[in-house]
Image (tube, helix red, strand yellow):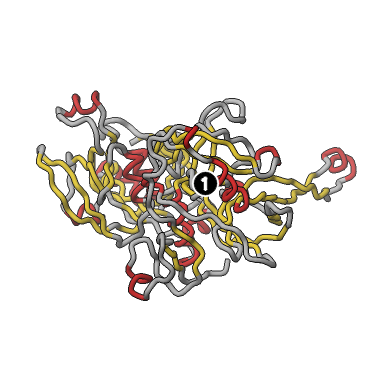
Amino acid sequence: MKKISGLFVVALLSGATTLGAYKLIFDENTVFSKSQNIVSVATPNYSKTVGLGAENIDFVDAADKAVHSVVHVKNVSYRTVCNPILEYYYGYRGGQQQEQVGTGSGVIISEDGYIVTNNHVIKDAQNLEITLNNGKSYKAKLIGTDEKMDISLIKIDADEKLPYSTFADSDNVKVGEWVLAVGNPYNLNSTVTAGIVSAKARNLDTSGLQSFIQTDAAVNPGNSGGALVNTRGELIGINTMISSTTGSYVGYSFAVPSNITRKIIEDILEYGMVQRGMLGVQGSDLNASISKELGLKISEGFYVGDVVKNSGAAEAGLRKGDIIVKLDHKTINTFADLNGYINTKRPNDKVQVTFLRDEKRMVTPVTLSKNDIVISNFKGLELENLSSADKSKFKVNSGVKISKIENPRLAQFEKELTGSVILRINNIPVTDMEQVNKLLSGKDENVGVQLEIMTVNGQLFRIII
C-alpha cells in the first residue's frame, strides 16, 4: 500500500473567496499538511433546520447533491471449488475458479476520485469496480482500511472532475434532525430515503466502534458505505449496518459519524495507518442503580473504576472514583460519548477533562497515550497489544500478550505464561487492548475469569484466575 504523506482539509467559509496562509495553517477546521486537498469541510451552521417540520424542509436540493457523489461498489473475488467425488475416486486435486460478487455503496470525497466506503464492502476484493451515478465505470485501488471502525479509502482515476460530498461536523447533529440515506440497496442505483436522527453515540457493544448515529431512514443490503446527509446535502455519516432479525430494514439503521470517518481518512493518507489515542481510564456508565450502589448523587457521566498505568490519565492525576462529565466542550454521559470523542483524536493530542471528585468539579488537561500501552491491573498480569512480529510468530491476527507476571499465585507458571498470548476471555475472542479494557471494565476482582492462552511453544490451554 502506497503511503501518501500529508493532507489538506479546506474549510468552506460562506462569502469568502480566498484564504490567507495564516488561515490555512491555523483555522480549527483545517488540517495542514503537504498533500493535496481531498476533504472539504462545511461551515458549522445547524440553525437553519432545527425545529422545522418536514413540510418546511426542501429535500430535493440535498438529494440532488448527494446522489451524484454516491457510487456503486462492485467487489469481485475468486475461490477454488473442489469436487470431492473426483478427489475420492481419481485423486483429482484441482479445482474450479468460482467468481464471487458483492455489492455496496461508496461516497466520493474529492474531485480527483478518492472514495470512502465500508471495510466489509471491499474486504478480500481481487477486483473493485466503481460505477458513478452517470453510468461510467472505473477500476478502483485500495488506499487503506480500518477494519476496527469498518472504514476504507479507495481511489479511481477518472477522466473528469467528480462531484463530491462535503463533510459536516457530526458532533453538531441533533436528535430529531431530518436526514437522508443515499445508496444502492439491492443494486437499485441512486436510492434516497428520509428519516430523522433517532439517537447519537449509540453503543451496539461491537468490538470496534461504540458511537454510531442511529436513524430511522430505510437502509438495506447494498446501502453499506453510502452517505447519510443532512438537509443541506452535507455528509454526517457513512451508513454501515442495520438492526434486523431478517437481514433487511425493520426500523433502525446506523452510521459511522463523519468526524470519525474524516479522522480515519486523514490518518490513512498521512501515516498509512490509523493513529489511535487512549485516555487511559476503565470504568462504566452511570445510571440510577449504579449511582445508588456507589453512593453517588449524580446518575450521568463515566465512572472511573481504574486508571491505566503509565497512561495520560494516570500522569494527569485522574484516579478511581472520579466521574468524567466533559471532554473539551463535549458533555459525557456514557462510555459511547467518551469513546466516540476519543476516536476523533490522535496520540499526544491534549483534551481538557472535566470530572467530579468528592462532588467537587475539577478540570485537568490530559495528553492522550498511544493505544498500545500496557495495563498491569488485571489479576496481576501485565498485558500489551501484539506487534506484527508477534502475530507472525504465533500465526494469529488478534489477541493480547502477557508481558509480565505480578500475581504471586501464578509465580510457578511465570516461565510458561510470560510472552504467551491470550486469545479468549470468558469465551469471547480477544482483538486488542482496547477491547480487553472494555471487557474487563467494572469486573469484580473477586470473580474468576477464564482465559484461553497460547504459549510460546504453540500449546493451547485454559485457566481460571
Is residue 405 or residue 59 the one in the foreground?
59
Say left or right for 322 vs 52. Answer: left
Say left or right for 281 vs 72. Answer: left
- Secondary structure, mark 1, is strand
Is residue 351 or residue 174 the one in the foreground?
174
Residue 146 rendering spot, x and y as whole percentages: 50, 53
Number of callouts: 1
Q: Quadrant of residue 33?
A: bottom left
Please state which amino acid type lies under the numbered disc 1.
Ile
- Label 1 sits on residue: 238
**Does residue 418 appear in the picture of this structure?**
no
Say left or right for 285 vs 167. Answer: left
Residue 180 rendering spot, x and y as whole percentages: 53, 40
Q: Quadrant of the C terminus?
A: top left
Say left or right for 451 vs 92. Answer: left
The residue depicted at 60 percent of the width and 66 percent of the height is 112
The residue depicted at 63 percent of the width and 37 percent of the height is 221
**Does residue 206 appear in the picture of this structure?**
yes
Q: Quadrant of residue 306?
A: top left
Q: Quadrant of the N terminus?
A: bottom right
Is residue 281 or residue 243 the one in the foreground?
243
Which residue lies most toward the right here? 90
The residue depicted at 49 percent of the width and 55 percent of the height is 166
Residue 53 rendering spot, x and y as whole percentages: 44, 32
Residue 441 rendering spot, x and y as whole percentages: 31, 38
The residue depicted at 58 percent of the width and 45 percent of the height is 63
Give above or below for 9 relative to 337.
Answer: below
Q: Residues within 10 Å of mark 1 (few under 14, many from 20)?
A: many
